[in-house]
Image (cartoon, rainbow, N blue to C red):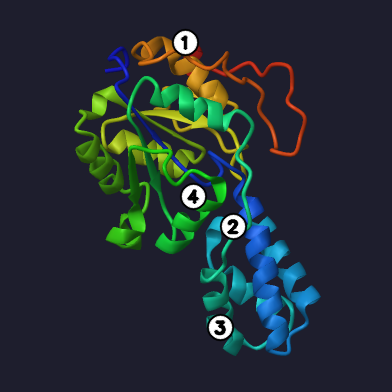
Amino acid sequence: MLTAPVRGVLLDLDDTLYPRAEFLDAAWRAVARHGAGRGLNPDALLGALREETAAGSARGGIIDRALARAGAAASHVEPLLAAFRAVEPPPLTPFPGVLRALATLRRRVPVGLVTDGEVTAQRRKLAALGLTDAFDVVVLSDLAGRAHRKPHPAPFREALARLDLPPEEVVMIGDRPDEDAVGALAAGLRAVRVRTGEHAACPDHPGTWLSTSCLAMAVHLLLPHLPDPHEPDAGPPELGCGPPTAPLPARDLPVLVGGRR
């Protein structure tokens, strides 16, 4: 299986293609403004939201705990949750090299997106990134219910069915070992880890095929396993990784799990 050619690629969205913290900060600003209209101190609320997010954005209940931290009543939770769900994000910035990496992949294989999260919010993120039409298949796991979020194998299997590809010929690229890697492996795919975003310091899942610093490097490592392009590439891959506002480093070498290339 590990030597099978790669005929398709699935990607995660949050913290794989762009820094989720950028979206969250814009969302918390909108929530704080809504809170001000309800008589809350917007600066105290925004500070509390940021502090709770810094402690782990995947925990859930951030607004509940932020209100408690700010000394505000729990009766504000539902209106503030509604404000969060209604957020129209400003333009979001992909990680360096992401756009060229996506173009490089799509010249070779079909590319799908598998993402968790409230459906409208995920669609708005794609629009804010300019990636609405960047994928052959988009699987929003929440359409099947939160119980089917990664690492449940269902969204991966849906993507495989829509791409009409067997799992051994598809890889999943994502930042979360506990979600992207575990779910991909459960569905029979190979897992490629990128160490970007909030969970960059987490150890790789033992079954990970490749592990590297960012999507650009992941695509660079996949090139020998991909078919020839349908048309020539626009240029050499961008191998720099880092925050979208940082200058590109000259080169970032990959870490290969188990020494595999």
> At 48% across and 29% down in the image, what residue appears?
102
- Looking at the rendered structure, the number of numbered marks drawn on it comes to 4
The residue singled out by tag 2 in the image is: 57
Callout 2: 10 Å neighbours few (<14), some, many (20+)?
A: some
The residue singled out by tag 1 in the image is: 261
Q: Is residue 135 left or right of residue 43?
A: left
What SS does tag 3 mark?
Answer: helix
What SS does tag 2 mark?
Answer: helix
Residue 36 found in image quarter: bottom right
The residue singled out by tag 4 in the image is: 126
The residue singled out by tag 3 in the image is: 79
Can you say whether 171 is above or below 80 in the image? above
Q: Is residue 49 left or right of residue 226?
A: right
Badge 2 or badge 3: first in the primary sequence: 2
Cα separation between marks 2 and 3: 20 Å
Badge 4 or badge 1: first in the primary sequence: 4
